Each structure stands twice: as C-alpha cells, then as structure tokens.
Image: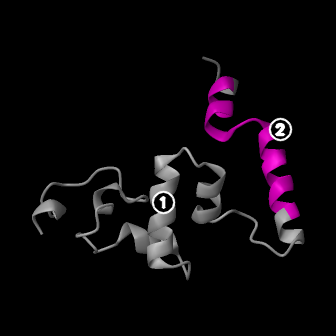
C-alpha cells in the first residue's frame, strides 16, 4: 500500500473533503449548523443501528453543550443502551465499569 492510498483511507480524497465543505457551507447559508446532529444523521441512515443508538443517546441527554462528553460519562446504567452508547473510550478496565444487567 502506498502512503497516498493510506492517506486517502484515513482522511478521504481531496474531492470528498471539498464536497463536505461545500455541504457545510450550504447548510450554514440556510441558517443551519454546518454539521448534522445525530438525529439528522439517523434519518439519513435508516438502516444503521449505530446511528439509531447515537440518536437516542443524543435525544436523551439533550443537545446543549458538548453532548459527546455527556453521553460518554452517562450514568444511566439501567438503560438498555448503556453498554452500547457511543463515544466511549476504546479500552475499559473491568473494575471501572459496573455490570449494568445486575443493577
């Protein structure tokens, strides 16, 4: 694999970045946020379970402030989506996370 191929895989092509920037600019001109929130993304991806879970967590914590951090530090361990919530750290120690099923 060439370094150019790896760069495209990680950062996308220049054309896709320009297209994303154009979409963000058009949304801002319409008075919308430059980027879609998780609810809008879930509507675009009706087949995506990950998008649906992210949207539900977003809806639960609200959109104020840094919603990613609020979802990451969620303490509602009785929620059926607790272990599936987005924005968690990749590596979790077993003693730092309680078993939500037994609570």
Q: Residue furthest bottom?
A: 64
Picture quarter with the C terminus: bottom left
Residue lying at 61% horizontally and 37% vertically, measured from the top left: 10
Residue lying at 47% horizontally and 50% vertically, measured from the top left: 50
Q: Position of residue 24 (x, y in %)?
A: 80, 60
Q: Are the residues flagged by discs 2 and 1 in contact, CB closer than 8 Å?
A: no
Q: Give the mark toward the camera: 2 or 1.
A: 1
Q: Secondary structure at mark 2?
A: helix
Quadrant for residue 94, please give it.
bottom left
Residue lying at 86% horizontally and 62% vertically, measured from the top left: 25
Q: Earlier in the sequence, mark 2 or mark 1?
A: 2
Query: Label 2 belongs to which residue?
Result: 15
The label number, if any, that marks residue 4 in the structure image:
none
Picture quarter with the N terminus: top right
Q: Which residue range is magenta in the image?
A: 5-26
Q: Nearer the viewer, residue 91 or 43?
A: 43
Q: Is residue 99 visible?
A: no
Mark 1 neighbour class, 10 Å CA radius: few under 14, some 14 to 19, many 20 or more? many
Q: Position of residue 86 (x, y in %)?
A: 42, 58
21 drawn magenta: yes
Here the colouring is: one colour
12 drawn magenta: yes
Q: Nearer the viewer, residue 14 or 63?
A: 63
Query: Label 1 belongs to which residue?
Result: 54
Magenta stretch, main secondary structure, is: helix
């Amino acid at each position: 694999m060439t370094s150019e191929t790896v760069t495209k895989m990680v950062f996308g092509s220049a054309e896709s970045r320009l297209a994303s920037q154009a979409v963000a600019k058009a949304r801002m001109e319409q008075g919308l946020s430059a980027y879609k929130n998780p609810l809008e993304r879930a509507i675009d991806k009706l087949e995506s379970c990950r998008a649906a879970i992210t949207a539900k967590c977003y809806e639960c914590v609200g959109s104020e402030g840094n919603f990613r951090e609020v979802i990451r530090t969620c303490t509602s361990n009785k929620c059926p989506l607790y272990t599936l919530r987005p924005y968690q750290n990749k590596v979790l120690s077993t003693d730092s996370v309680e078993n939500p099923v037994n609570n």
